């Protein structure tokens, strides 16, 4: 009983310690981007440390601002152990600027508890390509207006809201989720694995695929040609009631459903396939899943 009580006391003391020793972290970097058409944010050095106990939550918010320079603002706190702001090294090669993010020291053995939140501020007048390279940070893009957002996420989720981006071209990590809401884009290219791809109130053509992740797309309007594919996940699409398009829906093992007035091959004849058209249109939607249900509904 004494050993149990002593263990509980030590655990309580350990949990209370961070609140007694919290210390703020603050840092800001500004990088001129005159005549820069492509910005690469390299996060490959932000993989979780392998030694010690590291409970250091990091995140990234990306948004537009009225300034002329690119700015990176860091806010956070350290509750236990040595935690410092991230180091931002920047280089320039022609019209491409690269920002390399890293901790200013390699984590060693020990216990670290804290949080570091980063905000990347992109000038409103800048309309180039932003690349998230080998990104390990949970990222939220909000209120951003640029020409293109590209890159690859590593075991981190990505969310985009209230933005205007001409092209979105992203590869997600093994278990990373992608989410978008109220985003105008000309074209989307999304490649997922086990995580979900969810988009609500969006515009533009979409080419999206996953291995085991579900895909759910809610269009504000439907134009052009879109293709959705998953080997094992479900696919759900929501279209405005007045949409006119050609449909090609199929699932190898599960059913295919729609409430749209399709003229063509109906699901009653083949529960795994719907092919046909609604109205007179040059717009096309193709959706296929190997082991998931495929649904297209009006809203």
Image (tube, rainbow, N blue to C red):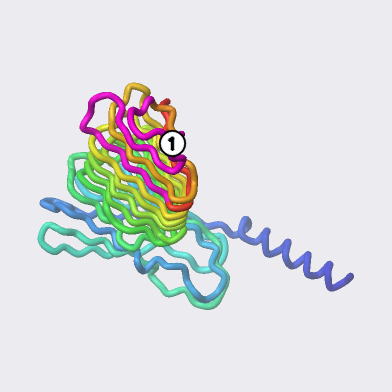
Q: Nearer the viewer, residue 280 or 205?
A: 280
Identified at 36% across, 60% down, the residue is 135
Q: Is residue 131 left or right of 160 when viewed as pictured? A: left
Q: Is residue 206 left or right of residue 111?
A: left
Q: Which residues are magenta?
A: 261-289
**Between residues 11 and 229, which one lies in front from this camera angle?**
229
Magenta-drawn stretch contains 270: yes
Q: Is residue 202 above or below residue 171?
A: above
Q: Nearer the viewer, residue 238 or 187?
A: 238
**Horizontal side of residue 99 vs 153, given as left or right:** left
Q: Which quadrant, please, contains the C terminus? A: top left
Percent position of residue 30, x then y: 25, 53
Residue linked to disc 1: 269
> Residue 150 at what x, y percent from top left?
27, 53
Q: Is-magenta flag for residue 269?
A: yes
Above or below — where is 170 with respect to 123? below
Element type where label 1 sits in the image: loop
Q: Position of residue 158 (x, y in %)?
A: 40, 50
Instruction: Single out the residue that lies furthest toward the front.
Output: 269
Q: Residue at x 23, y 39 (%)?
A: 186
- Which residue sits furthest right? 1
């Amino acid at each position: 009983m004494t050993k149990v009580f002593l263990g509980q006391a030590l655990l309580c003391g350990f949990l209370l310690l961070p609140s007694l020793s919290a210390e703020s972290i603050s840092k800001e970097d500004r990088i001129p981007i005159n005549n820069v058409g492509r910005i690469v944010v390299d996060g490959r050095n932000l993989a979780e440390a392998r030694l010690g106990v590291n409970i250091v939550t990091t995140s990234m918010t990306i948004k537009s601002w009225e300034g002329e320079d690119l700015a990176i603002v860091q806010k956070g706190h350290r509750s236990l152990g040595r935690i410092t702001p991230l180091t931002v090294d920047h280089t320039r090669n022609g019209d491409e600027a690269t920002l390399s993010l890293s901790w200013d020291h390699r984590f060693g053995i020990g216990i670290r508890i804290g949080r570091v939140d980063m905000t990347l501020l992109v000038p409103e007048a800048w309309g180039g390509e932003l690349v998230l390279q080998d990104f390990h940070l949970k990222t939220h893009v909000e209120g951003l207006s640029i020409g293109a957002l590209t890159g690859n996420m590593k075991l981190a989720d990505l969310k985009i809201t209230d933005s205007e981006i001409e092209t979105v071209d992203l590869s997600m990590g093994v278990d990373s989720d992608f989410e978008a809401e109220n985003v105008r884009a000309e074209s989307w290219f999304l490649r997922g694995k086990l995580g979900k791809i969810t988009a609500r109130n969006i515009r533009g053509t979409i080419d999206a695929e996953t291995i085991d992740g579900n895909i759910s797309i809610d269009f504000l309007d439907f134009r052009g040609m879109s293709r959705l594919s998953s080997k094992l996940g479900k696919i759900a699409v929501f279209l405005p009631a007045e949409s006119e398009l050609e449909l090609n829906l199929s699932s190898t093992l599960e059913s295919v459903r729609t409430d749209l007035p399709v003229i063509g091959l109906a699901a009653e004849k083949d529960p795994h396939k719907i092919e046909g058209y609604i109205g007179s249109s040059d717009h096309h939607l193709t959706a296929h899943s190997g082991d998931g249900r495929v649904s297209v509904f009006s809203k």
